[in-house]
Image (cartoon, rainbow, N blue to C red):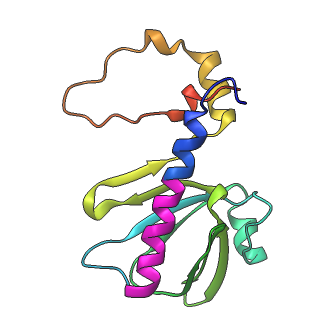
Amino acid sequence: MAKSIDYGNLMHRAMRGLIQTVLKDVSVHGLPGAHHFFITFDTTVERVVMADWLRSRYPGEMTIVVQHWFEDLIVTDEGFEITLNFGNQPEHLVIPFDAVRTFVDPSVEFGLRFETHDDDDEDDEDEDPEDDPPPPQGEAQIVRLDKFRKQ
């Protein structure tokens, strides 16, 4: 039996499930209205499949835009596949959900950000989270769930 509840991992799984549900709906019905997505992913994750020229251009991280032209959007439990146009050259991408770092739909000001353990380690060295000043009124706050993850 676990000694504690790993809320960070549970929340990450729930957020990835939300992305999966949204993308599945888009794969069947298309993008509704003005909705569009900016999806940033880690290109170093082993199961990411992309053209060599794209990987050399984006060796660590890449942001794709799912908006006007996309084809072959296939969503599975592990991730999604999509064909996008890069300078009039269609390229097929396979992106596991574990590689996704941000998912943003600017049309409705919605976004998710997935923190990595490396980010936490850097933050812990640079600052004490209890000494953070309160955020200015009227600005969005980002909840960093990994701070609650037991290491």
**Residue 25 in magenta stretch:** yes
Which residue is farthest left?
138
Q: How many marks?
A: 0
Tell me the residue at 63%/33% (across/down): 119
Question: Is residue 86 at all visible to an observer of this figure?
Answer: no
How far from the left and from the top, in percent, is residue 139? Answer: 25, 34
147, above or below 105, in the image: above
Decide which of 148, 114 is in the foreground and name it. Answer: 148
Q: Residue at x 56, y 26 (%)?
A: 147
Q: Quadrant of residue 107?
A: bottom left
Asked whether residue 64 is drawn in magenta, I would say no
For this rendering, which residue is in front, 8 or 39? 8
46 with respect to 57 (left or right) = right
Q: In this view of the protein, can residue 107 be seen by the observer?
A: yes
The image position of residue 52, as x and y in percent, is 78, 75
Dominant SS type (magenta) = helix
93 relative position to 56: left or right: left
The quadrant in which the N terminus is found is top right
Q: Does residue 28 appear left or right of residue 94 in this picture? A: left
The image quarter containing residue 123 is top right
x, y (%) of residue 98? 66, 56
| Residue 104, placed above or below residue 137 | below
**Residue positioned 60% across, 30% down in the render:** 5
Q: Quick one: quadrant of the C terminus?
A: top right
The magenta span reads 15-29
- The residue at 35%/80% (across/down) is 31
**Residue 97 x %, y %:** 62, 61
Relative to 17, is 84 above or below? Answer: below
Q: Residue 8 or 60: which is nearer the viewer?
A: 8
